[in-house]
């Protein structure tokens, strides 16, 4: 899945206004939060922990209008704990966030 940053960037820009430092801080905080939840998802082996991490990812995606993340969070919610294809796709997405 290719990362489409349009909506996320627009949301962050609207929140930061004309402050490039604040924009960078918001973007970094978003990436850190998503990365933390992906890590928790990857380490989850029970349904409860997997579901909580996936729901947190979905909340982040919805809050920041990150459509690609929202799709993957929904896939995680439908997958079994530890599903490697979902985790790999999320890691690729996070890497895309980090290189923009």
Image (tube, rainbow, N blue to C red):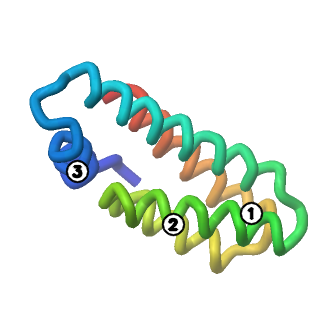
Residues tagged 3 and 1 counted as in contact (Cβ below 8 A): no
Q: Single out the residue that lies furthest toward the bottom.
A: 78
Residues tagged 1 and 2 counted as in contact (Cβ below 8 A): no
Total labels drawn? 3
Mark 2 lies on a secondary structure that is helix
Whether 60 is drawn above or below 77: the answer is: above
Q: Are there few (<14), some (14-19), or many (20+) residues within 10 Å of tag 2?
A: many
At a point 76% along the width and 66% down the height, the residue shown is 50
The residue that label 1 is drawn on is 83
Q: Nearer the viewer, residue 74 or 10?
A: 10
Q: Could you tell me how far apart the alpha carbons at marks 2 and 3 are, in whole angstroms? A: 16 Å
Judge left or right: residue 37 versus residue 18.
right
Q: Could you tell me how far apart the alpha carbons at marks 1 and 2 are, in whole angstroms? A: 17 Å
Q: Are there few (<14), some (14-19), or many (20+) residues within 10 Å of tag 3?
A: some
Whether 98 is drawn above or below 30: the answer is: above
Q: Could you tell me how far apart the alpha carbons at marks 3 and 1 are, in whole angstroms? A: 30 Å
Judge left or right: residue 31 versus residue 18.
right
At a point 21% along the width and 36% down the height, the residue shown is 16
Judge left or right: residue 92 versus residue 7.
right
The residue that label 3 is drawn on is 11
Image coords of residue 41 (percent x, y): 73, 55
Residue 42 — which label?
none
Of the two numbered discs 2 and 3 in the rendering, the one whose residue sits closer to the viewer: 3
Which tag, 1 or 2, sits closer to the chain's start? 2
Image coords of residue 78 (percent x, y): 64, 79
Q: Choose top left, top right, bottom left or bottom right for residue 98.
A: top left
Mark 3 lies on a secondary structure that is helix
At a point 51% along the width and 66% down the height, the residue shown is 58
């Amino acid at each position: 899945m290719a990362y489409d940053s349009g909506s996320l960037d627009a949301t962050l820009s609207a929140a930061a206004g004309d402050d490039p430092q604040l924009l960078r801080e918001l973007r970094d905080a978003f990436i850190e939060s998503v990365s933390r939840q992906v890590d928790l998802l990857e380490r989850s082996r029970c349904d409860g922990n997997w579901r909580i991490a996936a729901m947190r990812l979905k909340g982040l995606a919805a809050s920041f209008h990150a459509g690609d993340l929202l799709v993957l969070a929904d896939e995680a919610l439908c997958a079994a704990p530890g599903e490697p294809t979902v985790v790999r796709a999320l890691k690729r997405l996070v890497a895309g966030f980090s290189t923009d």
